[in-house]
Every structure is written in C-alpha cells, then in structure tokens.
Amino acid sequence: MQIRVIQAFGLVVAFVLVAVVGGCNPQLAPPLRTLGGVLILDQRDPVERGGGECRGTGAYEDLRSGVPVVVRNDRDEQVGTGTLRARPAPTSADGTVPLAERRRCVWEFAVPNLGAEAVYSVAIGNRGAVAYTRDELDKAGWTVQISLGS
C-alpha cells in the first residue's frame, strides 16, 4: 500500500513538473511583438518647432511628443501603450527647414510586448483608432504609417 502511495505521489510530481516546464518553454508561448509606427501630420498652417520638438497647430494642436499611443484588441481590451516622439525636421544645406517641412510634423512610436491577437486597434491621443489584422502587420513587418491633415 505504501508503495502505491509513493508511486501516485511520484506521478503527481511528474505531471506538475511537466506543466511548469512546459509553461515556461518559450517555444510553446506565442512570441511578443513590438509595433513600430510613424504619424505624419501635413497641415495648411505652419507647425510649431523648437528644441527638436514639433507640435501641430489649430485643429492639430493636441499632437506633440508624449501623446499616448494605445493599442487595443478586438475585445476592446488595452494590450499595449507607447508615446509619440518627434523626429527632427529635415534641413537644407544652409540649415534652414524647407517650406514643405514647415507645415509637417513626423513622430514615431513603439508599442512593445504585444501578444497574439486577431486585430489591433491603434489610437493616438483622442484621435480615432486605426485597426490592423495580425496578418496585415506580419506583411508590413510590424510597422505602420498613419497620416493626418490636408
């Protein structure tokens, strides 16, 4: 009788070890991904620039570095966050910003540690969300470009 109890205990320990080791095996878990992106604002009026920063004006004055980027799944659950970070303005050989760039801001963002979801909706600040399927992101190399403005 004592041998059967020890054998049963041994089987329970073996199942627990398999479950723990299997659960920790990175080959069994879906890989986490980072969604990279660029937001491009082209507006009619000049944008505000200074100190490496760019900020929209008028109807776009809410767009600037530090604005949150929120990613949600198809169940409207938040699955990741990031923030906008301004790219420096392109300059001419003499150091001036070309006319077209005086009306444009470009920000980049990254949202790390995204699990396997069927759909990802990307919302920047209080702006509406843009949805992408996992297949679309796989084809795009997990990088998106969003444009706003005139």
Image (cartoon, rainbow, N blue to C red):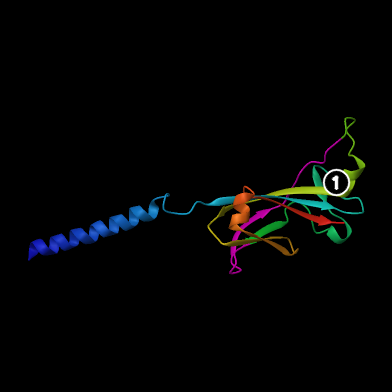
Is 82 on the left-hand or right-hand side of 4? right
Q: From the image, tell me which residue sits under label 1.
A: 49
Residue in the foreground of this view, choosing between 57 and 106? 106
Q: Where is residue 78 in the image (x, y as percent from the top left)?
A: 60, 64
Q: Residues within 10 Å of mark 1 (few under 14, many from 20)?
A: some
Image: magenta residue range: 72-91
Is 98 on the left-hand or right-hand side of 73? right
Quadrant containing the C terminus in the rendered view: bottom right
| Residue 90 among those drawn in magenta | yes
In the rendered structure, which amino acid carries the disc numbered 1?
Arg
Q: Where is residue 48 in the image (x, y as percent from the top left)?
A: 87, 49
Is 41 on the left-hand or right-hand side of 72? right
Residue shown at the point (29%, 55%) measured from the top left: 17
Q: Please, what secondary structure does the residue beneath circle 1 have? A: strand
| Residue 27 among those drawn in magenta | no
Residue shown at the point (79%, 41%) measured from the top left: 88
